[in-house]
Amino acid sequence: MTLRFPFPVCSPLPPVLASSLHRRLSIPSRSSSSFSPTPLFSSDHRPPLFLRPPAFAASRTDLHDFRRWAESLALAAGPRLSASDGGPDAALLRRELAWLVEDATVAAASESGVGEELRLRVELEELYRLWKARIEERRPFQYILGCEHWRDLVLVVKEGVLIPRPETEMVVDLVAEVEGFEKGLWADLGTGSGAIAVGIGRMLQEGGRVFATDLSPVALEVARLNVERYELKDKIELRRGSWFEPLRDVEGKLMGLVSNPPYIPSSHIPGLQAEVGQHEPKLALDGGDAGMDHLLHLCEGSASALKSGGFFAFETNGDEQSEFLADLMSIKLGNFFHNIKMISDFAGIQRFVTGFRR
């Protein structure tokens, strides 16, 4: 989770830019057989835009008019949003517009392969409303589409659930480096959308399992959708509760635990980009006065949760938090842990702290 703050410990890429650029750099096939095309969406959760049936229609002229109107909004608003809090500039907004139209439209088939009419997954009026919300309300683009591209996954997201960031993908890579991880018991604490749990679960072999916990019922519902889409119900068990509380029956048995917890100092929340501070859940952002409340709890609880030789990986706000945690785990908790390391993300920020239970 990289967020943009008025101090230099975070990635220089704002989260909207980082996520949106990453979204199209390596796009997994949406027709891939690696996930179920018909997940069980509840009545209060609409499927992502690209999964909705093309039940509506519009002429190419009408769609062209929409794009001209939407581009005019992007060109007018981009400089202001970028200057105000590092939000999306006009170029990024225009790319987002192209992706929105791509997800919303299906060319109507005809004998010649060309038609004047386009099939839409939402009504044309809804496209106008969605784009107006993107510009005027700063609604995150991922919430508008209902999905985010992460690793080789296309994950369901919605309001009330943190949007997974590209740098968090490294947590899955760190797990994959642990010898014998494929058959162990793992925990993803504060799973949110289930991104990390799904990433790990897809690599597990017989006997391997992930316990994914979260306090938010909204997050657990979204995580359930993503687990079902990738057909991992036999590998991932979702549990509701705060941090280690739902894991008492596996205390001392875990081969590893991972977490991307809230780590933003409370006083910095109002200064976040509008897409983040006004729309993403505070529960997933606010780490207390110094941003360390949950990280410290995770460090202390890991001693009881992990079995001997068990691995942990925590994401932090960057260098200062990572250095503090590494010192804590090496010195104060040195009787419990060893081989403590700080791992940098793609921007060179020391984003992760890892280590092993003695």
Image: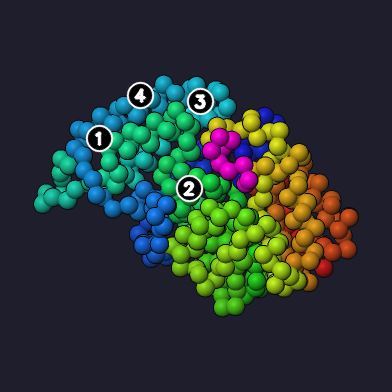
Whether residue 322 is situated above or below residue 194 in the rendered picture: above
Which one is closest to the eye, mark 3 or mark 2?
2
Q: Would you say 209 lies left or right of 48 here?
A: right
Q: According to the image, label 1 marks what residue? A: 63
Q: Residues within 10 Å of mark 4 (few under 14, many from 20)?
A: some
Residue 318 seen from this side: no
Q: Which residue is mark 3?
A: 81
Q: Which residue is mark 4?
A: 72
Residue at point 32%, 52% (across, down):
52
Tell whether 107 sits left or right of 311: left
Q: CA distance from mark 3 to mark 2?
A: 23 Å
Q: Secondary structure at mark 4?
A: helix
The nearer-to-camera label among 2 and 4 is 2
Task: Please report contact status of discs 3 and 2: CB closer than 8 Å, yes or no.
Answer: no
Identify which amino acid the numbered label 1 is placed on.
Leu
The span shown in magenta is 276-284
Residue type at numbered disc 3: Leu
**Residue position marked by numbered label 2 in the rendering:** 158
Asked if 78 appears above or below 233 in the picture, the reply is above
Q: Earlier in the sequence, mark 2 or mark 1?
A: 1
Q: Residues within 10 Å of mark 3 (few under 14, many from 20)?
A: many
Which residue is at a point 23% across and 45% down the rendered structure image? Answer: 56
